[in-house]
Structures are given as structure tokens and as C-alpha cells.
Image (tube, rainbow, N blue to C red):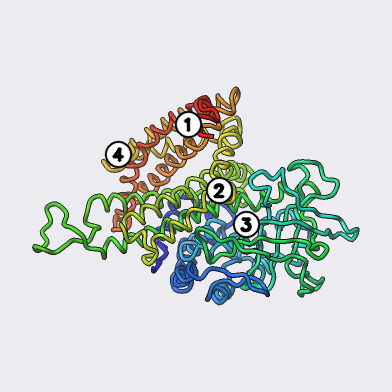
Amino acid sequence: MSYRAPVRDMAFVLQEVAGLGGLSAGGGFAELTPDLVEAVLEEGAKLAGEVLAPLNHAADREGARLEADGVKTPKGFAEAYRRWVDGGWGALAAAPEYGGQGLPLALATAMQEMWNAANMSFGLCPILSQGAIEALTAHGTEEQKRLYLARLVSGEWTGTMNLTEPQAGSDLNALKARAVPQGDGTYRITGTKIFITYGDHDMADNIVHLVLARLPDAPAGTRGISLFLVPKFLVNPDGSLGARNDVKCVGLEEKLGIHGSPTCVMSYGDEGGAIGTLIGEENRGLACMFTMMNNARLLVGTQGVAIAERAYQHALAYANERRQGRPAGSDLPPGEMAPIVAHPDVRRMLLTMKSLTAAARAICYANAVAIDRAHHGADEAAREAGRARADLLTPIAKSFSTDIGVEVASIGVQIHGGMGFIEETGAAQYYRDARILPIYEGTNGIQAIDLVTRKLPLGNGAVVRGFIAEMRETAARAQRSNRDDLAAIGSALDKGLDALDEATEWMLTRLKSSADDCLAGASPYLRLFGTVAGGHFLALGALAAAASDGDGFMQARLATAGFYAAQQLPLAAGLVGPSTAGAGMLYALDAEGFGN
């Protein structure tokens, strides 16, 4: 059940693939050296491996529980959270004026991978707090920032995001929670919210809920939604805690996975209304909430990378220990069986796990660097380019990486054989935990819709075409190499880009006449995009590895990229048809044909 953070791999991807080194040279992080990056990663790896990972399996069995005085997290979580806070990990990327360390989001994203690989149920809590910090920093009043931000940054208090209601899931038009102004700058909040991660727990002194609700005279639909800050305990003007607010957890969901993370049904206003304050402008709450949701989507994508890495490490350890059969041509003594890692099909599965995880990690880290560039680029042109790239990559990072998390965890179960289906081995937990990832923070279907209808048209297609051109240059660099392995990677990437180019131009043209046709192919198109983008970033890593001293780690980078180029990039061509088939076949069956 052990986990060891792949520190050297993370540092390599950040510096050589995602572009963090460029930020250090020309952005707002001049003091961020490669040695500092690796030192931070090494220190975080100790907490992840020695404190968080040992709690993971037991927390899955124990789960969170609702008692008379509130929600209790599994044994060891509260103590581990105090160690996390004492280490200053929540402050890593936050602004110095609120106690943050001012380091890049990309580095904090790598740390989130560690927390979630070690213990995804635990790692969810910091993700929600980081989102609340983002929203308050961008849209909060000066008083809200004064009272709440420093404590959220330190981790002394935690944050939540309250969108979903029993009748309002992805469609927030149906949202019914109410906010009535009191005439003193506060509002009384009433309503029920469901699926609220860490809506109540025993790890922090206060919980800061960000809640979507409607004012009495609000217009219908999403245009009438406002965002409110509603603390579990009211906060006095001097920052001390006051009375308990009228908000409580009234139920915990029984889930397929992430059992250690409390998923709460929250009731606001059972005793007259919870007191809250407005964040941003009235009826502009959705825009404020999306500030935290966009970063949350990247971090959920990072959770996909995390669970894939953990499942890979678990499967690799098992494959080295489990002995079964003898591969062809084996020179083992008669009667002695080989570790299953010696069998070709098991090696194929392990390399599939490793290469898909590497591709997803690079996409997420590149997305994070783009967000950093948007905020800290050397000039406005650099910042605008960062925003455009981040907008394009966010739905891909979320969807591709979480799909990969599920697929890699499933392969991990397969490598364990029958024992993978037995909870005792731990392989099944990763699969169960991973399955939520394509669903929450905007389903992957919604991310695909966002990609084709909002992100492809950015700059009249200039943003996506610019990225494709950049990937073409990577392919050309590899093909110009005097190395056969790099040339093969470049050739496979070039063919994958042909497929992506064809499907992208079809989408851009078809959007003008038939959005339904684009929506019908949006999900396979996103998979096509993610597959090719992953190949591009792995090729960048291979080029950097080939230019190095060629130790075992660098040889592994080349081999992993080569395997991905041979086994994954050819699938891109097969995704063009599903991406461009149109909507007609979806309506070929009537209700009777569907079996109703």
C-alpha cells in the first residue's frame, strides 16, 4: 500500500516540458530555481508518503461519520491535517499579503498530485479551500479578505463550494436556495445543498461556505444567481469566532469510493436563516463561482493523474512480487515460476499505465504553467497568451486526465487478476475512488461541450490553430533528429496532428451551421485532442531526455514516449470519424427503439 512520489519525474515535467523554467526566467518567479523546486517536492513527498498514504486504506474502510455534534473524519485525518497546516502547504501559491508564499500554481499543482495520490479522500479538502481562496481574492470585499483570507491560506479554516441542490445538478437554472437582504449588509440564506465535499468535519476550527442562492427579486435562470460567504461560525470584527451559524450537515452520502471524504447534505436556515455576506455583485454569482471552478477543474484533472500514478505503483509492485507461469524462452530452473512482470502482456499493460499517466501529468502541469503565465507573464502579450492557452487546456486537462485515471486504475485491477477484485489487495479502491473524477466539477461531457463551443472559437480559431502549429514544430524537431527513436516519435505525432487538424477544422466550420453535429462528436473529439496533446508533451520530454547525459531515468523518458507514440497516437486517426459523424445517427432510434 506504500506510495513514493515520483519527485524527479515531476520536476522534469515542470521544468523541461510544461515550461516552468521559462516563468522563472521571464515572469514573476525570478528566485524559483530548479533546486528550490526539487527541495519543495522532496519535502512534500515525505508528508505524502509517511503521513497521508498510510491512512488511505484504513480510511476507506472506516469512512466519515455523522454524529450528534457534527461530522467526524477517519482516524488520523485531523492529526495529519494539522501537520499539513504546520508545514505551510496551503500557503504555497497564495499571495504574500495574506500569508502566502507566492510560489507558482504549477508547483502547488504538483503538490496536489502528491496529496491525492497518497490519499485522495484527504486531498479533496485542500482543493476546495484553494478554490475558495481564488474566489475571495478575485471578488471578495476588503472586509471579507481581511477576515477570511489569511486563515484560509494558512489552513486554519477550510472552504467549500455549494452549488448542487436535489433538483439542480449541472443545470443551475433550477436552483432554489434563497437569500433575503437584512438591510445591514447581511443576508439570510435558506435552502438545501447536496454533494458538498467537506461540508462539515472536525479538522479545522471554521468552515467557510461559498453558496449560490437567489435574491427575492432576482431574474430567472442563471442570470439571477448570487454568491454568498456563509461561515459555519460567525466571525467577529476582530477575527475571533462568534456564535454558530444556522447551517449544518443533515446527512452523509454513502458513496462508491472516497469514503474518507465527507460528502454532505447541507441545510441552511432551519432556525430562521444562515447569515451570509455577498461576494461580488448581486446576480453575478455564477461568474464569481467560475473563478474557483476553473482552477478546481484543473485540480480534479490532477486527481486523475494522482490516482493513475498510485494505481501504477501498486500494480508494478504486485507484478514484481507475483509469480505465475514462465515466459517463452525462459532460462528459469524447471518448476520455478517467473514474476508476472516478465510476461509480455503484463509489460504492455504496465507501460500503458505509465505512458498514459505521464501524458496526463504533462497536460495538467502545462495548464497550470499557462495559468501562472496569465497572472505573472513578463508583459501583457505574455499574459494574454497564457490566458488563451489555459482556457483551451482546462477542459482537456479535466476530462482527459480523469478518464485516464479511471482507465489506468482499471488496468491495475486487471494486472492483479482475480486478486484485483478482492478488496484486501487495495487495487479496487483506486478504481472506486477514481470513478467520481469524470463526474464532479462539471461532467466530462460538459467539458467536451465547453471545448468545442467556447474554446475552439477563441480568436476565431487562432488559439487552437496556434497550439496545433506549436505541436507541429515539436513533431518536426523530433523528425529532424539523427536518432531513429525520436524520428519515430515525431512521425507518429505528425500523423496524430493530421487527425486533430482535420477534426478541428470540421468542428470550426460546422459550428456555424449545426451546433448539434459538433455536440454529438464533442466527447470523442476531446479524447482525440488529449491523445495528441499528450503525445506532444511526451515528445518534448523525449527531446530533452535525448539531449541529456542519458542515465536510466532519461532512457525511461525516451522509452515511455516511444511506447505512447506506437500504442496511443495511432488511435487518434480512429477518433476522427466519431468526432465528425454528426448528430443524425443519434436520432435514428425513437423511444420504442431505445426500449421504452
Residue 435 x, y percent position in the rendering: 48, 53
* Labels 2 and 4: the sequence-earlier one: 2
User: For mark 3, what is the residue?
Assistant: 195
Extreme residue toward the left, this view = 334
**Spatial distance from mark 3 to mark 1, Cα to Cα?**
32 Å
Q: Is mark 4 on a helix, strand or loop?
A: helix
Callout 2 crowding tier (Cα within 10 Å): few <14, some 14–19, many ≥20? many
Does the rendering let one see residue 133? no
Select label 3 or label 1 by which is in front.
3
Residue 96 spot, x, y in % from top left: 66, 65
- Quadrant assignment, res 493: top left
Identify the element where label 1 is drawn: helix
Left or right: 254 in relation to 147: left
> From what the image shows, is residue 54 above or below residue 419?
below
Q: Which amino acid does label 4 sit on?
A: Ala
Q: Name the residue under label 4.
A: 488
Residue that carries the numbered disc 2 in the rendered image: 370
Task: Measure the C-alpha gap from mark 2 to mark 3.
Answer: 30 Å
Relative vertical location of residue 509 with respect to residue 194 in this rendering, above or below: above
